[in-house]
Image (tube, rainbow, N blue to C red):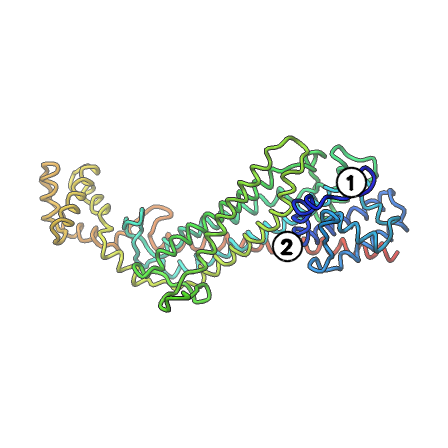
Amino acid sequence: MGGRLATGPSDELVRAGYAGEAAAAPALADALSRSDIAHAIALIEGGGLDPQRGSELLRGLLELDAIPASEFPWDPTVGDAFQNREKVLTERVGAGAAGWLSAGRPRREPFRVALRLIAAEGLAATAARFSDMSAALAAQAKPLAGALAADYTYLQPAQPTTVGHLLLTWAYPTLRAAERMQHIQRDFTGSVAGVGGSAGSRWPLNRERLADLLGHPHVEPHAKDAMWQSDPYLVLLSALAIGATSISQFAQDLEIWCSQEFGWIELDDAHSRVSALMPQKKNPYALAVLRTWAGQATGDLTAALTTMHTGAARTDHFHLLNSLIPRALDEAERSAALAAAVAGGMTIHADRMEQSARNAFVTAADVADMLAQTTGLDYRTAHHVIGRVVRDQVEHGGVIDAARISAAANEVAGAVIVIDEAELAAALDPAQCAALRPQTGSSDPDQVRAMCDDVAVRSAEIREWAEGYVVADAKAAETLRAKAREMVGA
């Protein structure tokens, strides 16, 4: 209440609007504090605020900064997080000093600044967790680079491969997710502080100085775009949803592989849960957690896209984003950390995987390849011949040998072929087939080991970058607070 309005907010507005904003305030508190302190320093340095009065303002802001977010008296009847901070600030230093906090900036600016700080740090932290998962999968895969396994498509045995090659199936998508977040994170390193309402301000606020105080390497060039840009947040949420989907696919396959029917994988006890009714069960509970998060991440992106269907300079989407972005990043960081722990802690039963490969005719395509390469049959005809052999075996049983294949070739194509027994034996051996893949990225053990090394190196680079950014951001925050304390002391 005050100025243009004669009354405070209605109970309905408090319950439907401000209550949600107040609930989101603790996650924004630290970044809002940095925004306020930087603004006060820039006002004083630019000559827009008397140093003595500015010192009082900074003293109050430092006192607010020292209050743990969980202990701050957030009150939805007061309004949003900015109004709550302003109220407590006024109680601490009086209106004469607190009243300068809004000089040259609208209420939305500290939220925009805070959200970018949270997004940049959160993306770095989440990327590190995704890289942990890709690194964990590579570590599990390398010693199993030559261990025989069956690849499955449509949940049907398909071709021979290796355990290591299968595990890398998820290492690369999660690594790409981490690298995608590193790339996107750069969109949040530009400062949006000091733009005034949307076209600049007559107050002597140096935007480049504000960027430096906040730890940003540059400023966003267009004032109105800086204040209202929303597309980077859509890209952020899209990256989280894509990364979550990759982890969800990993979780879905893993749940099948953990089943008694497969028995390929066993989750660590720390990532499982027992049934409250059936004592024999060891439920892969962590996998359900990961799939649930993936659904939430997809819904978050959809919600953000929907609320952004407005004209320019509306608050609809930021009313959503101020609470959504911190929560989504926190959930992504925690969930990716769980996925990494699952990947690193699971037990792989390579013997069961080899047994599955040997019990199913997963070398059928290799036998067709061998026929086309050694008998003169074209590949499509060879494919039909082996398909006929498989149908005959399913219907009548028995073994697959040269005589059976030759009979099928005569029946299908009227061809008389001579099959080299040694060539056929090699094509029927799934272990030899898995190893005889000359292409880059194949199941050849040397190729698998090379990919494991590639994933490990790239994962380490992401983690090094992420840890470096988090440290640099923390240093920028401490430098800002030290500058404020210095000015208060002066």
- Residue under the point 36% across and 60% down: 258
Contact between marks 1 and 2 (CB within 8 A): the answer is no
Can you say whether 281 is above or below 407 in the image?
A: below
Q: Is residue 95 left or right of residue 239?
A: right
Name the residue carrying label 1.
105
Choose top left, top right, bottom left or bottom right for residue 88: bottom right
Name the residue carrying label 2.
470
Extreme residue in the front direction: 11
Residue 213 visible in this rendered orientation of the protein: no
Secondary structure under the numbered disc 1 in the rendered image: loop
Q: Nearer the viewer, residue 57 or 377?
A: 57
Q: Is residue 233 left or right of residue 58?
A: left
Spatial separation of the CA atoms under disc 1 and disc 2: 28 Å
- Residue under the point 34% across and 63% down: 349
> Residue 317, percent across and down?
63, 39
Q: Is residue 487 left or right of residue 382?
A: right
Q: Is residue 482 left or right of residue 436?
A: right
Secondary structure under the numbered disc 2 in the rendered image: helix
Extreme residue in the top direction: 311
> Residue 466, percent across and down?
59, 53
Q: Amino acid at mark 1?
A: Arg
* Closer to viewer: mark 1 or mark 2: 1
Tag 2 or tag 1, which sits nearer the N-term? 1
Q: Amino acid at mark 2?
A: Val
> Residue 488, percent across and down?
85, 56
- Residue under the point 18% across and 43% down: 387
> Residue 231, percent across and down?
60, 37
Q: Nearer the viewer, residue 393 or 83?
A: 83
